[in-house]
């Protein structure tokens, strides 16, 4: 039997968070997903709310600034905080 | 799964502009103005609404040449001196003569500049000799202004496309673009009569001191894609060894920002709170002094504002915490840094290529033409020294006009199926591979090697080792595994960064002298050597696919330099701090 490296996933704390009570993605809003230069945000198909899918944040702020309901919050990534 | 799973989407446009940040939108709009019948496509890896270096706006123009404050001749002289003489003055002069026209255009579109009580532009002095800095305290809306103009001009826009290679025809002219969608993974084949590259700096070359991959000075979307695409299409790149290295807020890695605070009384200081440089304008010589202070017992270096009046501090906070990098305020708050009481700790950035700040870019002439027919370039990636945002807009304008004239009456070239098939195979290999290396780790290792071996002061033996390491990374790239289209984008970026890393090493090895202060300080050749190296150094891919460099004469100056000003940028260290 040959040896195969399996994947181990590295845990991270999302620096971009969404207040699901304020998020209106279920009504079709995708503003934060659209404006992220790094394409890190997505809509969760189960909850129909925006969330941070990939941890590659440049803490540049369009997602927070452009959110029409103030649901998105950007923290400086821990490594730089 | 096989290659056939990925849909081929074919389109054709007269002109394709790659990159919708700063230069790109201007290029698209001006090409359309020149000839409204043209079909123009603006491609962006992100979303044009918030892409590029000015995603969150900009707090000022760093190189405004405004009648009554500066002349094009004076500006051209200053940049020639700041860039140690290695300048095609025709490109800088063309920018300078058009600078005010570009400002007036932006002003008409609704970009707000600071004006004084009489309605005149409130120009400030930051450079060593002349006055070219025009604040934009309300500059956060600049992308909105551009987007409105793109819509008005009816420019077609496709977002989230990672362009990977340019197609060339039998004559060597550019005739199309290949890329993929970073969400659906669809393959895009776009026929074009001309292509304008506006892909920004190579900002993910070095690893920031924080070790965080995406904590770069540049918007990390700008991985150097434009440099790699131009290189593989056969274009010449100029003076890449003149790296971009900037003085930044430590860890945060954004500008501190001396251009905003300088005119209001802020300055760069050492650990004793003393000034050590006369002029905060970013030049290689200034960075050399900054580096000496950091490494010597006088470091760290700080931005000093704590002596300023409350109302001045409030003005600075308003500008710096709402423009360009608005999370600065939060960063300072987390570390209890209040401008009123504490100096801001600074550090130097990772290395990169960027002609916007230094001089490393794809070679262009004063019409934004590259050395490849049908290929144009503008903005941070195009080699017009110290061109900054206003230079990006201006050369975007030139590129739009030049490309529109070039495609007039021109037919499409047939696309080479072989080139397309080869690229499709290269792009999708990481998705098709069942097991393999994670792109983020390969990128980390590659960029750590860049720091270990290429960061100035540059050492010949280290750079030779770098080339060996980059060859090994090439083998690792052939083992990358991407789990989804997003990770495929990162995998393709690793290849781009590796290409740029090899270019950085070879360009630096070729120029056997020191020039541009810290940007190209070679320990084995510590002196500037005008007799042998008063040349541009160009790099390109030769017929057999090898990376080669050659010297090119510096074009005769249009604006001669006076002897007394020739060395102005060599004397940046304050005499008091020397003692």
Image: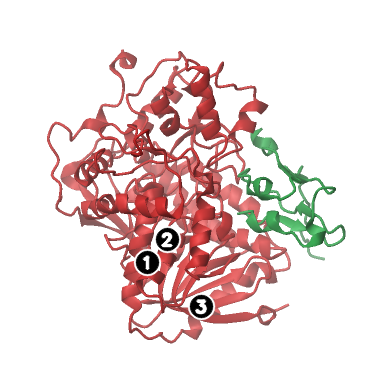
Chain colours: A green, B red
Q: Earlier in the sequence, mark 3 or mark 1?
A: 3
Q: Is residue B19 visible?
A: no
- Residue B44 is drawn in which quadrant? bottom right
Nearer to me, B338 or B276: B338
Q: Which residue is mark 1?
A: B400
Q: Earlier in the sequence, mark 2 or mark 1?
A: 2
Label 3 marks which chain's residue?
A: B
- Element on which disc 2 rests: helix
Q: Is residue B579 above or below residue B58?
A: above
Task: Give coordinates of residue A67: x percent, y percent.
Answer: 70, 50
Residue at the right extreme of this rendering: A46
Q: Is residue B556 above or below residue B154?
A: above
Q: Is residue B284 above or below residue B91?
A: above
Q: Earlier in the sequence, mark 2 or mark 3?
A: 2
- Element on which disc 1 rests: helix
Label 2 and label 1: CA atoms lie apart by 7 Å
Image quarter of the N terminus of chain B: bottom right
- Element on which disc 3 rests: strand
Tell me if label 2 and label 1 are in contact, CB under 8 Å: yes
Mark 2: few/some/many CA within 10 Å (<14, 14-19, 20+): many
Nearer to me, B465 or A67: A67
Nearer to me, B471 or A17: A17
Disc nearest the viewer among 3 and 1: 1
Q: Which residue is mark 2?
A: B26
The lab-note entry on whether marks 2 and 1 share a chain reads: yes
């Amino acid at each position: 039997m040959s040896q195969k490296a399996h994947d181990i996933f590295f845990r991270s704390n999302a620096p971009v968070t969404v207040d699901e009570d304020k998020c209106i993605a279920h009504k079709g809003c995708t503003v934060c997903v659209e404006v992220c230069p790094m394409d890190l945000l997505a809509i969760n198909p189960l909850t129909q709310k925006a969330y941070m899918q990939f941890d590659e944040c440049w803490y540049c702020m369009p997602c927070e600034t452009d959110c029409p309901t103030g649901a998105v919050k950007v923290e400086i990534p821990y490594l730089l905080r | 799964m096989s290659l056939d799973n990925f849909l081929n989407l074919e389109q054709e446009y007269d002109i394709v502009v790659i990159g919708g940040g700063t230069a790109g939108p201007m290029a698209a709009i001006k090409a359309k103005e020149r000839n409204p019948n043209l079909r123009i496509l603006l491609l962006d890896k992100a979303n044009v609404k918030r892409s590029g270096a000015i995603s969150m706006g900009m707090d000022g123009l760093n190189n405004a040449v405004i009648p009554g404050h500066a002349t094009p001749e004076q500006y051209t002289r200053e940049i020639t001196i700041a860039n140690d003489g290695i300048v095609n003055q025709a490109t800088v002069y063309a920018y300078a003569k058009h600078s005010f026209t570009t400002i007036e255009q932006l002003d008409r579109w609704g970009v707000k500049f600071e004006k004084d009580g009489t309605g005149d532009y409130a120009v400030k002095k930051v450079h060593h000799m002349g006055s070219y800095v025009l604040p934009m305290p309300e500059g956060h809306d600049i992308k909105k202004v551009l987007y409105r103009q793109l819509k008005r001009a009816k420019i077609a826009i496709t977002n989230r496309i990672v362009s990977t290679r340019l197609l060339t025809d039998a004559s060597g002219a550019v005739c199309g673009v290949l890329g993929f969608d970073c969400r659906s993974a669809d393959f895009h084949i776009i026929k074009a009569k001309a292509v304008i590259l506006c892909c920004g700096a190579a900002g993910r070359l070095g690893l920031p001191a924080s070790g965080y991959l995406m904590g770069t000075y540049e918007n990390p979307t700008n991985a150097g894609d434009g440099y790699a695409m131009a290189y593989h299409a056969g274009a010449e790149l100029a003076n890449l060894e003149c790296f971009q290295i900037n003085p930044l807020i430590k860890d945060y890695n954004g500008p501190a920002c001396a251009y905003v605070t300088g005119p209001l009384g802020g300055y760069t200081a050492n650990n004793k709170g003393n000034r050590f440089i006369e002029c905060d304008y970013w030049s290689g010589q200034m960075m050399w002094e900054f580096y000496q202070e950091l490494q010597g017992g006088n470091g760290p270096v700080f931005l000093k504002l704590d002596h300023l009046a409350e109302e001045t501090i409030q003005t600075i906070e308003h500008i710096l915490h709402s423009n360009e990098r608005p999370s600065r305020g939060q960063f300072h708050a987390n570390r209890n840094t209040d401008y009123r009481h504490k100096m801001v700790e600074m550090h130097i950035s990772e290395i990169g290529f960027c002609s916007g700040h230094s001089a490393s870019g794809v070679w262009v002439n004063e019409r934004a033409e590259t050395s490849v027919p049908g290929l144009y370039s503008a903005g941070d990636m195009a080699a017009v020294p110290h061109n900054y945002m206003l230079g990006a807009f201006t050369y975007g304008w030139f590129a739009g006009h030049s490309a529109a004239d070039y495609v007039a009456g021109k037919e499409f070239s047939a696309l080479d199926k072989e080139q397309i098939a080869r690229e499709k195979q290269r792009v999708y290999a990481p998705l098709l591979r069942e097991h393999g290396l994670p792109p983020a780790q390969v990128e980390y290792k590659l960029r750590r090697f860049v720091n270990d071996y290429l960061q100035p002061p540059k050492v010949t033996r280290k750079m030779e080792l770098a080339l060996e390491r980059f060859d090994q990374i090439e083998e690792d790239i052939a083992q990358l595994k991407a789990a989804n289209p997003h990770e495929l984008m990162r995998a393709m970026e690793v290849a781009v960064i590796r290409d740029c890393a090899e270019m950085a090493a070879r360009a630096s090895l070729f120029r056997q002298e020191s020039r541009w202060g810290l940007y190209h300080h070679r320990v084995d050749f510590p002196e500037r050597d005008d007799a042998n190296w008063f040349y541009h150094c160009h790099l390109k891919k030769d017929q057999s696919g090898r990376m080669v460099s050659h010297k090119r004469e510096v074009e005769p100056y249009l604006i001669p330099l006076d002897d007394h000003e020739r060395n102005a940028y060599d004397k940046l260290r304050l005499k008091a701090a020397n003692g």
